[in-house]
C-alpha cells in the first residue's frame, strides 16, 4: 500500500488538505471557474458574460421563454406584456426570467415575475448591467444561505 504522503503528491507537487477548488488552484495556478472561463473563451472567442449578453439581447422575451422552456403559455405572454408596460427593456425582462428560473430550479421560492418587475422599476434596475449585477448578488446571497 502506498504511503499516505505519497497519495497527496501529484506530478511531484504536494497537495494539501482543502476544497477541490483549492487543490485545483494549487496544481494549475488558477481556479476551476477561471479554467472554465479560459476554455470557454478559447472555444467561442468571447467571455461567458459576453455570450450571455448576446443571448439575452438577441431574443424578445416571448421567444426567450419559448427557447428556455420549449413552449409559451398565454400566462407567459400576459406577464411579458405587464413587464413591458412597466417600462422594462426586453433584455432586462429576459434577465428577470432567468433570475426567477434559477430560484425555482434550486427549490427556492422564486419571486413572482410581476412583483420582481415592479421592484426592479422601483430600484431603477433598467439596464442589462444593473439587472445582471442585482440578479447575481441575489443568487450568491441565496446560494450561500442555501448551502449553509
Image (tube, helix red, strand yellow):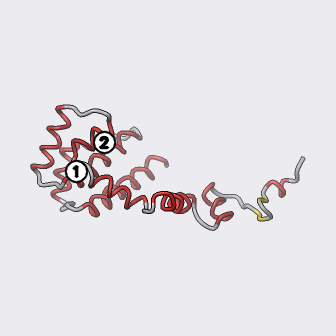
Position of residue 113 measured from the top left corner of the image (x, y, whole percent): 22, 44
| Mark 1, other Cα within 10 Å: few <14 / some 14–19 / many ≥20 | many
Residue for badge 1: 93
Position of residue 55 measured from the top left corner of the image (x, y, whole percent): 32, 52
Residue for badge 2: 110
Q: Is residue 79 left or right of residue 95?
A: left
Q: Is residue 102 left or right of residue 20?
A: left
Q: Residue at x 66, y 59 (%)?
A: 23
Q: Is residue 21 left or right of residue 98?
A: right
**Nearer-the-camera pick, 31 or 40:** 40
CA gap between label 2 and label 1 equals 15 Å
Q: Is residue 147 left or right of residue 63?
A: right
Position of residue 10 measured from the top left corner of the image (x, y, whole percent): 77, 59
Q: Nearer the viewer, mark 2 or mark 1?
A: 1
Where, by quadrant of the figure, is residue 45 drawn?
bottom left
| Mark 2, other Cα within 10 Å: few <14 / some 14–19 / many ≥20 | some
Q: Residue furthest left?
A: 85
Nearest to N terminus: mark 2 or mark 1: 1
SS under mark 2: loop
Amino acid at each position: 500500500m502506498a504511503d499516505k504522503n505519497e497519495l497527496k503528491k501529484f506530478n511531484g507537487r504536494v497537495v494539501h488538505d482543502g476544497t477541490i477548488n483549492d487543490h485545483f488552484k494549487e496544481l494549475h495556478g488558477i481556479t476551476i471557474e477561471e479554467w472554465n472561463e479560459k476554455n470557454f473563451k478559447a472555444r467561442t472567442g468571447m467571455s461567458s458574460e459576453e455570450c450571455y449578453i448576446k443571448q439575452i439581447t438577441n431574443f424578445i422575451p416571448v421567444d426567450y421563454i419559448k427557447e428556455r422552456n420549449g413552449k409559451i403559455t398565454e400566462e407567459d405572454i400576459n406577464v411579458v406584456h405587464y413587464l413591458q408596460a412597466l417600462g422594462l427593456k426586453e433584455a432586462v425582462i429576459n434577465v428577470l426570467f432567468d433570475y426567477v428560473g434559477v430560484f425555482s430550479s434550486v427549490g427556492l421560492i422564486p419571486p413572482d415575475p410581476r412583483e420582481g418587475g415592479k421592484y426592479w422599476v422601483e430600484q431603477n434596475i433598467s439596464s442589462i448591467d444593473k439587472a445582471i449585477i442585482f440578479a447575481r448578488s441575489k443568487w450568491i446571497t441565496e446560494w450561500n444561505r442555501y448551502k449553509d
